[in-house]
Amino acid sequence: MPRGLFRRSLIIIVAPMFLLQAIVSYIFFERDLDTTTRRMARDVAADTALLIGLEDSQPVQERIALRALAARMLRYDLSFVLGARVAPRPLHARHSTIDDALDETISQQIGEGRAFATHSDGQAFTIAVQVHDGTLRILVPRERITVSAPDIFILWMVGSSLILLGVAILFLRNQVRPIERLARAADAFGKGRAVPDFKPYGATEVRRAAQAFLTMRERIERHVQQRTEMLAGVSHDLKTPLTRIRLQLAMMKPGAEVEALRQDIAEMERMLDEYLDFARGEDGAKAELADLGALLRDVTDAATRIHPAGRGQITLDAPDGILLAVKRNALRRCVANLIDNALKHGTGAHVSLAREERTAEIRVDDDGPGIPADKREEAFRPFHRLDGNQQTGGVGLGLTIARDIARAHGGDLVLSKSPEGGLRATIKLPV
């Protein structure tokens, strides 16, 4: 079965129509046409028997007059060949339904002991019958034995079916189009792209589904907006006392304890920023067309400036020309988190970009210890650290935020073994 709704619906229309035509054609040609042909052939056979009776019972002179009268009244072309014998039908001659019906009915009317033969040339039927002193030839028009032009029935049936099929395809396409638009709108929304011109239309059920989609989209957007506004307020409320503490520490005499407190405050601010990044998710930005190669160059340049040279080298292999609608700031943060994670656990990070059949893949490789296959999904859990080591920095949200951003674009983030021996993080974005 085809996978598309339009083709499946078309089969639902075409299959019964084809089956109905096959049944009607069988009944018409095998039943009605055969019955009608035999009835018409029976009338011709009765006329033939009448003419044979006249030939056998009347004198020669009267037979000529009666033959002319019968030809005029019965509308047959009659001829008589004195002393001729009926030639049998050739063995290789084709026997159609009409020939069989005509032979059968004539044999029943005139008796099996009398020789006769029938022949068709496409326009008329010739019946040669043996009489007592010769052969009587009867030329019968084709329309006297069979219905005229039975192919017209098939032509009308097929022609009307094609017209009905064309109308059905037109209306069916109009019914399927709203469903296709709803699917495209849902797919675009899943990829974080705006769908401002989508409106419900079509059948009642499709309108109801489209309205449910719009309601769901509004609820999700409202939820994200409320969460972002709440966290912005939390950020402001938490940073205000931290700022006061920082100012008080600035007025205190330098010392080991003061320096330790300053580091704790900096760590708290960094942790707070990571919490907000994780909860903010898509950050309300709109997707814009961007060259992924240029975007990755900006990210790696910024990462190179931020990270000290001793933490490892960042290399990039990204061709230009791969255009995709993305949320620039969110995708930057996603790749930056992966680079930061690679530099924490390895001696360097290699960023590459490749275009696959249906996706654009951003890969970040490192040469660190990697993650066992059975623990890779566990690495995405929020606030969870596989190594349990707090000295490497972070609160266990880097991969979680990165996957959240990738999925907000309709893609995903997967982990695998790197060719360099460490971990490969691959961002798959649908094209």
Image: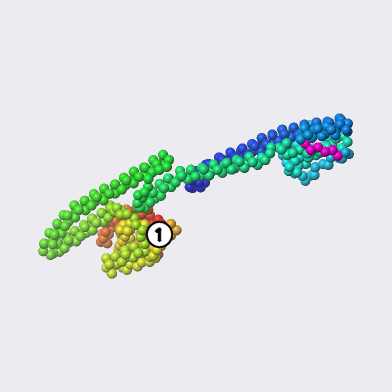
Which residue is at the front of the view, 52 or 65?
65
Q: How many marks?
A: 1
| Circle 1: element type | strand
Main SS class of the magenta portion in the image: strand
Image coordinates for residue 166, horizontal then vertical, percent: 53, 44
In screen coordinates, is 94 left or right of 132?
left
Residue 114 magenta-highlighted: no
Magenta stretch, residue numbers: 76-81
In this view, which residue lies farthest toward the top? Answer: 57
Image coordinates for residue 310, horizontal then vertical, percent: 28, 69
Image coordinates for residue 350, horizontal then vertical, percent: 36, 65
Disc 1 marks which amino acid?
Ala
Which residue is at the front of the view, 328 or 372?
328
Does the image show residue 151? yes
In screen coordinates, is 155 left or right of 273?
right
Which residue, given by chain and number where applicable, does mark 1 sit on? 360
At a point 81% along the width and 32% down the height, the residue shown is 69
Image coordinates for residue 346, horizontal then vertical, percent: 32, 65
**Viewport quadrant of the C terminus:** bottom left
At a point 12% along the width and 59% down the height, the residue shown is 248
